[in-house]
């Protein structure tokens, strides 16, 4: 599967035209990872968006009780999208659960491309925002149960 095909399978790029997909395929880097290889580690500075091209990636977070698995992602799924928009500390770790291939778009390359193709980059930023909003909505009940938080309204 090419970088272009991987982008076509990703929900973040579902509304992109072939030309728009080509813009991001042009800055995407393909990486092959043996099982057990970290993509990133909790508390490190995030600098890239990843799209799983093949294989699976395990997402975990450290808790007082030990490492907790949050998700296992497969082909077409994405992670690390917030780091594309702004560098920040990773809240989770991501490790290749099986041999896998990922597509990486770095923060640096995204902002370089934004100078050339601002509309395409804005469209991706809005897709990331919509995806995050949907995830927050899905997690609403869990968020209300966090200590020290009072339900809104």
Image (cartoon, helix red, strand yellow):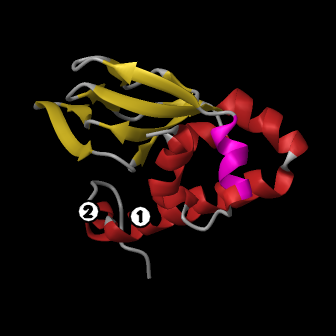
**Would you say 11 lies left or right of 95 here?**
right
Q: Are marks 1 and 2 in contact (CB under 8 Å)?
A: no
**Would you say 14 lies left or right of 118 here?**
left
Between 97 and 100, which is closer to the camera in this rendering? 100
Q: Where residue 86 sits in the image (x, y, percent)?
A: 66, 38
The residue drawn where x is 63% and y is 40% is 25
**Quarter containing the C terminus:** bottom left
The residue drawn where x is 72% and y is 28% is 108
The residue stretch that appears in magenta: 19-26
Residue 25 within the segment the image draws in magenta: yes
Between 128 and 109, which is closer to the camera in this rendering? 109
- Is 148 rendered above or below residue 29? below
The residue drawn where x is 16% and y is 36% is 68
**Would you say 122 lies left or right of 148 here?**
right
Between 146 and 35, which is closer to the camera in this rendering? 35
Which mark lies nearer to you, 1 or 2? 1
Kind of element beneath mark 2 = helix
The answer, for residue 75, to whether it is visible in the render is yes
The residue drawn where x is 89% and y is 42% is 116
Q: Earlier in the sequence, mark 1 or mark 2?
A: 1
Quadrant in the picture for residue 59: top left
**Quarter containing the N terminus:** top left
The residue wearing badge 2 is 142
The residue wearing badge 1 is 136
């Amino acid at each position: 599967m090419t970088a272009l095909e991987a982008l076509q399978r990703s929900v973040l790029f579902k509304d992109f035209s072939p030309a728009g997909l080509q813009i991001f395929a042009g800055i995407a880097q393909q990486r092959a990872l043996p099982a057990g290889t970290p993509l990133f580690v909790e508390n490190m500075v995030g600098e890239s968006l990843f799209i799983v091209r093949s294989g699976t990636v395990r997402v975990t977070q450290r808790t007082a009780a030990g490492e907790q698995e949050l998700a296992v992602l497969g082909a077409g799924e994405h992670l690390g999208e917030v780091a594309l928009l702004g560098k920040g500390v990773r809240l989770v770790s991501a490790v290749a659960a099986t041999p896998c291939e990922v597509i990486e778009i770095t923060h640096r390359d995204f902002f370089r491309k934004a100078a050339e193709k601002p509309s395409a980059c804005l469209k991706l930023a809005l897709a990331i925002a919509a995806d995050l909003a949907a995830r927050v909505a899905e997690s609403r009940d869990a968020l209300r149960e966090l200590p020290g938080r009072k339900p809104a309204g």
